[in-house]
Amino acid sequence: MWEYTDTVTEHFQNPRNVGEVKNASGTGDVGSLACGDALKLTLKIEDNVITDAKFKTFGCASAIASSSALTEMVKGMTVEEAEKITNEDIANFLGGLPKEKMHCSVMGREALEAAIADFRGLVLPMAEGEVICECFGVTDLEIKRAIQESNLRSVEEITNFTKAGGGCGKCEDKLRAQLSETLSEDLRMVPAVEKPKRMTALQKIKKIEEVLEREVRPGLKKDGGDIELIDVDGDFVTVSLRGSCTSCKNSQTTLKEYVERKLREHVLDTLIVEEEQ
Amino acid sequence: MGSGESKVVYMDNNATTRVAPEVVEAMMPYLTDYYGNPSSMHSFGGQVGEAVKKARLQVAQLLGCDTDEVTFTSCGTESDSTAILSALRAYPEKRHIITTRVEHPAIKNLCDNISHITGHKYRVTRLKVSNDGMIDMDEYAQALSDDTAIVSVMWANNETGVILPVSDMARMAKSRNILFHTDAVQAVGKIPINLAEEDIDYLSLAGHKLHAPKGVGVLYVRKGTAFVPFLSGGHQEDGRRGGTENVASIVALGRACELANEMMEDENTRVRALRDKLEQGLLTTIPKSMLNGNKHSRLPNTANISFEFVEGEAILLHMNRYNICASSGSACTSGSLEPSHVLRAMGVPFTAAHGSIRFSLSIYNTEEEVDFVLEKMPIIINELRKMSPFWEDD
C-alpha cells in the first residue's frame, strides 16, 4: 500500500471543486485514458484574478488529491501568481507525495499551464519538441524541464516525475543520454550510477586505453601535456593530467570537451570523465 | 487498520488467505514443545521427523501423487525457479523454453532474465492468449521442438482465475519427450487435481494460498524426472533441497491440504455460487462493467471485473473505507506505470484495464458479505465516475 499523508487521503476522500466551470476563461486538458491518468482543469478569470477553478480527474488517489489541491491553491491568485506554481508546490501543499507518484503533481502543473495558455490564446511549447517516450507521449522538452526543475539525477527519477520510460522501456538509452546532456551543462553535477552496459569491465578499460592512446594523447603531447588513466568505475573514468596540462587553466575544458567527448564517441556515450583529486 | 465499526470483508484470497484455525492448532506444538531437529539422532528430534512425514502424506493425498514426489520449499517462487533451472541443467544442450504471456512474475521474470541467470543463450517462446485468456493450441503445437528443454504453463491465472488446458499441453509435451512444469499455486486446493493421471513433470504450490501460513511451498517432481537441486546443502528432503525444514509451517501445510480435500466440494458449490452472485450483481447494477477472462474455464472463487473510465487504485481505496479488501490490475497499484501484463496480453482495452478489480473469495466468505459489497460498489463507482473527465452522464 502507498504511504499517503493525511492531507492526500483527506483530499482524495473529500475532493474540493469537482466539476466544470461554466463558460470557462481557460481550459487545460492533459493526460489520457491510455496513460492511466487525465485531468481537465477549468478556470474562471475575472480582472486577471482566478475567481473559480474546478477539475475532473481520471486517476489514482494522488492524482485526485493533486487536482483538488491545485484548485484550492489557485483560487484568488492573479494569473501571474498562479503561473509560478510548480509541481513541488502542489506536492508540498499535500504534505508530500510518494516519489513514484510525483508525476501526479506534474500533471497538475501541466494542466494549470495549459489552462493559462488557453486563456491567453497561446500554444504551449511543451507539446512541441521530439517525442522521446512513445508509450506516454513525453517530449524531450518536458524531460529536460523536469530534470532541471526537480534536480533529477537518474532515469528512475525521470520516470517517477514524467512517466517517460515507464512503459516498454525502449527509450531508456535516450533518457540516459538526455540526462547526461542536460547535466553536463553543469560540470559539478554527478548523475546517479547507471545500469551496467553489455561491455565487460575489462573490455571497457581496454577500449578506453586504446582511445586515449590513439585519439587523445597525440593532441595533448603536441602541447607538452599527457594523460594517464587511473580508474574506471562503472561510467566514471578517472584520469590524471600530466605535463603542461597540470598548469593549464583550460584543463577542465580539455577534460570535458575533448577527452570525455572522444571517449563517449568511441567507447560509450554515458561515460563521465573526472580528474583525480 | 480499519474503523473497527465494520468487520473486514476479505475478498483478496488470490493474494493470500486466512490461516485456518485448524491449521494454527496443528502447527502450534511445533513452535512450542516440539522444537527438535528432524535430522537429529535422538527421539526428541525424531518425533518431529514423523510430523514432517505425515505432512508429506497429506500433501500427496491432495495432489494424487506419491510421498517421495513431494519436496518442501520456502514458497511458490522457489519451487518455480527450482523446476525450471533443474530442467535446464539436466538438458544443457537444449536451449528453448516455452511459456505464456500471462504467467505470474515468478515465472515471467525468471524467463525474461534466463540467459543472464544461467549465462547461456536461451530462446523463449511466450504463447499468446485470446481475449478471454485462453491458449491457442495450434501455436503451442508448432512451438514444441527438439530444442525445447521445458514448457512452463500456469494451471490457473492469478488475476483472472482462467484455467489453462495443462493436461492436454503436458500430454503433447510428453509425446515429444519434453519436460512440463506447471505453476499451480492458484489451482491447488480450489479445483480437484490428480497427478497420477497427468503427464506433468513438475508442479509448484504455495501454502499461503490454501489457508496455511506464508513461507512454505512444495515442488512436486514426478518419479524418474531429471532433478538438479537449487539449494545445495544437507541431506534434507532426500537431498533435493538443503536447509533445515520449516517444520511448523510444513505441518501446517499438510493440515491445510487435508482441509482443502474436505472443503473441495464446498469451494466448488457454495463458494462458486457466492462468486456468481457477486459477479452477476456487479455486472447488472453497474453500467459499462465487464468480466475479464473466460467465464467457464475458471476457478470457482475468482471474478475479475473492469469498471470503465475509473481507475483501480482509487476504487480500492474507497473500498478500503468500507473494509472491503480486493486487488486491481491497474498501473497505479503496482508501482509500475502500465496496467497488468495479463490484461494487456488479453487485449483488454486501456479504458477497462486501468479500472479492473479482482475479487477472490474463500470458504470463509458469506452471503451477507457479498450483499454488502453489492450494496457499496455501485456507490463507489458512481462517485468516481462523476469526477472522471471521460464519463458522460446520460
Image: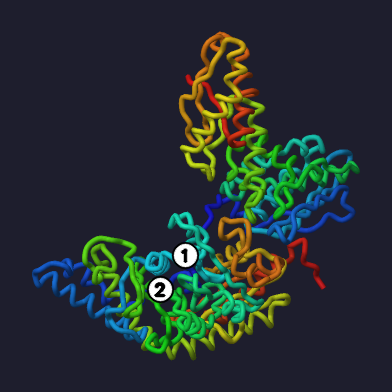
Q: Mark 1: give few (<14), some (14-19) or many (20+) Cα within 10 Å.
A: some
Q: Position of residue A188 (x, y in %)?
A: 58, 25
Q: Position of residue B18 (x, y in %)?
A: 40, 73
Q: Position of residue A24 (x, y in %)?
A: 87, 51
> In the image, B127: left or right of B364?
right
Judging depth in this view, the residue of B69 and A243 nearest the camera is A243
Q: Amino acid at mark 2?
A: Ser
Tags 1 and 2 both on a single chain: yes
> In the image, B245: left or right of B127?
left
Q: Position of residue B177 (x, y in %)?
A: 44, 79
> In the image, B160: left or right of A113?
left
Residue B202 in which image quadrant: bottom left
Answer with mark 1 or mark 2, whichever residue precedes in sequence. Answer: 1
> In the image, B49: left or right of B264?
left
Identify the subunit bearing mark 2: B
- Does the rendering let one see residue B184? no
Identify the subunit bearing mark 1: B
Cα distance in 3D space between marks 1 and 2: 11 Å
The answer to whether marks 1 and 2 mark residues whose Cβ atoms lie closer than 8 Å is yes
Residue B106 bears which disc, if any? Answer: 1
Residue of label 2: B204
